[in-house]
Image (cartoon, rainbow, N blue to C red):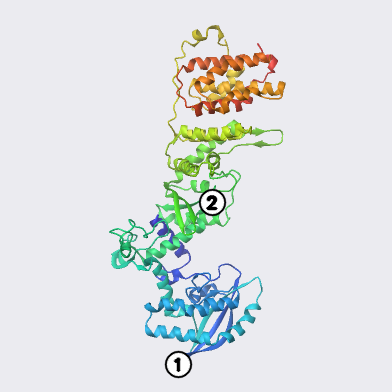
Amino acid sequence: MIEAMKEIGEYALEKENKDLNDFVSILVENPASNETYKHVFCIKFASSQDNFKFKGIEHQEYSKEKIAKYLYKRGSSNGPDITPTARVTEIKKTFSNKIIGWFSKPLKEAKPILDGEEVQFLELLGKCIKGNEDIILSELEPKVNSIDAKENSILTLVLEENGFIRYVGDFEVFRKILKNNGASKFYRKYDIISRDDDKVCSVCKTHKEVYGFVTPYEFYTVDKRGFVSGGFDQSKAWRNNPICLECALKIKVGKEYIEKYMSFGFYGFNFLLIPKLLNKSAKEAIFDVFENFNEKKFAFNKEYENFLQANENDILEILSETNDYLNFNFQFYEKSNSSYRILLYIEGVRPSRLRELFKSKGIVDKRKIFSNYFSNDTETKSIQFTLGNVRCFFPNTPDDPDTNKYFLEVANGIFTGTSIDYNFLLKYIMQRIRKDFRKENPIRYSLFQGFQMLDFLSQLHLLGNYNGGKCVNSKNLSVLLDDIAPKENSGYEERTNIIFSEFESFFNTDAKKAIFLEGTLVQYLLNIQKSQRGSTPFRTKLRGLNLDERYVKRIFPEIINKLEEYDSNYYKELENLISKYMIQSGTDWKMPNDEISFYFVLGMNMSNLLKPPKSEKEVKK
């Protein structure tokens, strides 16, 4: 992680034409945070022997070429910045807090690193500014207030010497203060200093001065016993992770680049997608992908497929088209105030793995029951697999605080190829379906989402503990069924065989086929009850979709009896088919109740696909 950040930081610095050996150029920020900053107001002084004299306000046009001269580095929002250059908000307040205020606390804190002449220079300059406060403001306010209200400005100091104008960044004393401020964050914390000379940097492996508090994220701390090797001496924190100033600055810049271009939102989570380059020569091409995507310069074709979420373009398909000269690390995290917690870190996902995911997605998306989930004369709706489908079964809910963790575990399994327990998935699929069933809400969409998720994971061979039941040998089926078995393929058998062959891995036992078809038969009964009575009383017999082997076998004859009572038993071919699979399934299915319930409700919701294209009268025996 640290190595990747350093590499990315080096790329970002090279792109900005910053000297990797000039720490000040790395630390300095552009005071023009956006294009509205068009003006620079310079408070001009002239040096006169051992004193300074205020010479007026000079209005300049902002110049990107002068960033190093402005030497801006943001400080606290209510206090001074790191140097006496500031972005103007309300001019009087900015002058007081950011300019006059700089010559109090920041100067006081910097004195230990300055020599006597430097301290005297700054104290005299500060005294001159404070002594001319009223006249400076009287000239500054009308100039600042005269600019276009839609434009912003910057306030800084300049010194006229021997006909030359020197800016803040031209003075070594301000550069020294900026450098010390940037470095001190890496070695000073809790009023403790942790650094040492001539030690091996853990990143670049060279002997340099190293620091102990270099951490890109706040999850690494040394404020608790156990985080500091060799005891609780925080000044020895450098021993844990010694990093030199050069590497620390590159890591810092790398973090900023990652958060700008490689940070994404995802169903209530934030995650970083960090590339680790195996071929350094290709880094510019891959970084261009991230930059163009972030800046919305990418043109997506109609065949573009989403994997992370359906309602936003995501970057994964683009990255899947690259060669395996890099891999990707996913860092899911949550941030609250100063707390940073990594929820999941997925390491080493190659583009070829992403291509496997999209290949499996393409297979399941094209299945007819998903691609034509809803169709009429004017429109066709499909169910496209994304990780959002998984999120539907593991929502962020106070009812089950573990669902966020489970969702990330499933995502981890998908990206890394780690198996995911089949029964665990069924539990949460059925949990949502049963909830909808109890509330008499439609269950078909969530059911098909669950089925598609299982199908996708099956394509990737990721379903752990996925076993069939104990089946009897079907060689003597004709003897067992005697003359009950149909003498030729019926409409139902032809149609069910299409489903069973399309989802061969899911209908790999006769028990599953029997349960599925019994669910279909129940739905036909419920349709008849709704048509004749306006209600579906048999629905109460389904135990809220909490079914087991014994109960499924028990209600089979009850379903048939009810159809006979309504004089509407048009489904004897289907009943014979169920009987066939029941006999072949044996007596020990070894199927969890969630799995039995899932196949049952799957049959209910696919019943419209199985009815032969004949009128009910024609199929009645």
| Quarter where residue 230 is shown | bottom left
Q: Residue at x 43, y 42 (%)?
A: 416
Residue sitting farthest toward the bottom: 49
At 52% from the left and 85% from the top, the residue drawn is: 130
Q: Quadrant of residue 448?
A: top right
- Tell me the SS state at disc 1: loop
Residue 98 in percent (x, y) is at 52, 76
Q: In which quadrant of the rendered image does the C terminus lie?
A: top right
Q: Where is residue 603 drawn, in percent x and y?
A: 58, 25
The total of numbered circles placed on residues is 2
The numbered dot on residue 49 is 1
Q: Is residue 566 left or right of residue 263?
A: right
Residue 545 seen in the figure = yes
Is the residue marked by circle 1 packed among few (<14), some (14-19), or many (20+) residues within 10 Å?
A: few
- The residue located at (58%, 83%) in the rendering is 58
- Give me the C-alpha separation between circle 2 and circle 1: 59 Å
According to the picture, the residue beneath numbered tag 2 turns out to be 265
Amino acid beneath label 2: Gly
Q: Pinpoint residue 450: horizontal percent, then vertical percent.
A: 54, 34
Residue 87, image x and y in percent? 56, 73
Badge 2 density bin: few <14, some 14–19, many ≥20, Cα 10 Å: few
Q: Quadrant of residue 371?
A: top right
Depth order, front residue of 141/143: 141
Which structural element holds mark 2?
Answer: strand
